[in-house]
Amino acid sequence: MKLWRSRWLRAAVLPVLVGATAAAGPVARADVIPELPLIIDVSTPADGQCAGPLHGTTAVYFPTGVPAHADVEWRILGGGQPIRTGIIPMNSDVMTIGFDIGQDELPADGRLRVDARARVPGGAASGYGKPWNLRVGRECRPLHVVSAGDAVTWGQGLDLDRTFAGLTAQTLGDQTGRATRLHDYSVSGAALDAPGLHTGAGDASCPLDTKTADESGANELPDVFCQLEQAGAEARAHGYPVDLVLLDGCINDLDPVFGIPVGVTPGTRDLTAAVRRECGGLGAEAVNPAAGVPYFSGAKLGYGGRGMRAAIEKAHALPGNPKVLVSNYFHGADAPGVPEVLRARWSEFVRASAEAFRQAAAQANAVAGEAYAVAADGLASQDGDRKLWMNPLGDEEISLRLLACPQLTDVPPQCRATAIAHADPDGAREYARAFLLNPAMREWFGGGGPSGDGFTVSRTAGPAGTMVDFDAEPAGGAIRQYDWYFGDGAHIVTKGTAVSHAYTDPGPNLPRLLVTDMTGRQSVYELGEPIVIE
């Protein structure tokens, strides 16, 4: 699979790495070799590799003089064995190396690993740095998946093959038996819509080649609409259709550090109204009340912009008119041990944003007269001891790519917050798999989506404390287990079809049911409307 990292990664990483090197000073001893060089990009053809040799490039980052007079030895491995190797002098901080690999040399599974190490005069060598893993397909018509969003989609600190988007594309390829190409344009800190980026010529004015700076010198990160603009430009330039777009966004529009949990960012005190405005694009105000906030606030970039429905429609307008999966990663019970007032606001955001995404997808489908968009989440992975893999932000190792978010500067705080999370990669894969259990995804890409409603409820509204009865009889027989997700953070497992649950929070609370049959096959059902408590 082609794991296509957008050019934003290099723009974000290199200044930080250079600054870290400058702060540390030059390495004086030839036998002291840091954890560099670092592979920061591998690019292979976007249109599939079905005949002829594989042509590609790899970019190696290694500041000149660290250590002094060192060269870089790079290699490409397949099946654990070197396929291509070479030694190059580093004449600049980043060197791009071209390579060609014959079809008969590619491993059967298409998996390649690229890494590099430093060599100093006299022959001393470092260990190989953190590898860049990729999978090369052999099909002429692979599935092309575009990823657009913020740090959660980008996978701050994760290797490319462990990000949510990467794992989803891999799992989709495994399920369909087709090669996949991931084109990732997501950016840490991105807003759903930052009106300040769209000056005069609309999305066509997006800064697609470099970051821009506002009058204060702060970096403006490309929003989801700019990311989609870039995705369309590259798809048209390379002549491939897009099959699926993974979207998220609007968390940075509301400020995930101060605005959502605390409510101190102007415009976010009424969180439900703010979600309707920023995630739903409803009721945007002419003046941004957070414009003068002295600390970082994503609301400075995203306040009063277009909502998720407009992003969905723009995604569907990409070449190939792709399906669109709007991804909601969060749950109300994801932060145990925090003060109740913070947990309550976070839970409110989770449910309100999920409902805004669901409505946006439904409205886009209704206008188009076809079902091409769906809002989904990874609820099926919310189980056990509630590890951080419910939210795939982190790794069991500290990656050098964490330096994309400096540790000790006035960088956006959510960069630092996501960088400290350590996830279980196997669990993260299950998290990605849960998204693909959505009935619409299974209908679009094979696997047989479940038919019917799956379960019924006794009521969909009432006062606090309302008891709602659930019945999974419509899901059919031969069911081994019923996993009930009530939409308020609660989850229970039953062997029988009937269960009751009391709701106390206002909601909206959208229940879902995961059924596992006697063969281990799983299906997800979703209620057609949320349960609202007055």
Image (spheres, helix red, strand yellow):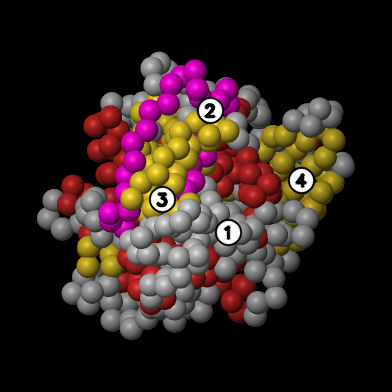
Return the disc, 2 or 1, that comes first in the chain's sequence: 2
Return the disc, 2 or 4, that comes first in the chain's sequence: 2
Which one is closest to the eye, mark 3 or mark 1?
A: 3
| Residue 356 in sight | no
Look at label 3 and name its amino acid: Val
Look at label 4 and name its amino acid: Asp
* 3D distance between C-alphas at marks 4 and 3: 52 Å
Look at label 1 and name its amino acid: Gly
Work out whether 227 lies above or below 371: below
* 3D distance between C-alphas at marks 3 and 2: 25 Å
- Residue lying at 66% horizontally and 34% vertically, measured from the top left: 453
Work out whether 237 lies above or below 200: above
Q: Are marks 2 and 1 in contact (CB under 8 Å)?
A: no
Q: Which residue is under mark 2?
A: 110
Return the disc, 4 or 3, that comes first in the chain's sequence: 3
**Span highlighted in magenta in the image:** 90-116
Q: Quadrant of the C terminus?
A: bottom right
Task: State the image coordinates of residue 230 (x, y, percent, origin top left).
Answer: 28, 44
Residue 483's disc is 4
Element type where label 4 sits in the image? strand
Q: How many neighbours does mark 2 have within 10 angstroms: few (below 14), some (14-19), or many (20 or more)?
A: some
Task: Tell me which corner region of the image, top left, top right, bottom left or bottom right, holds residue 452.
Answer: top right
Q: Which residue is under mark 1?
A: 394
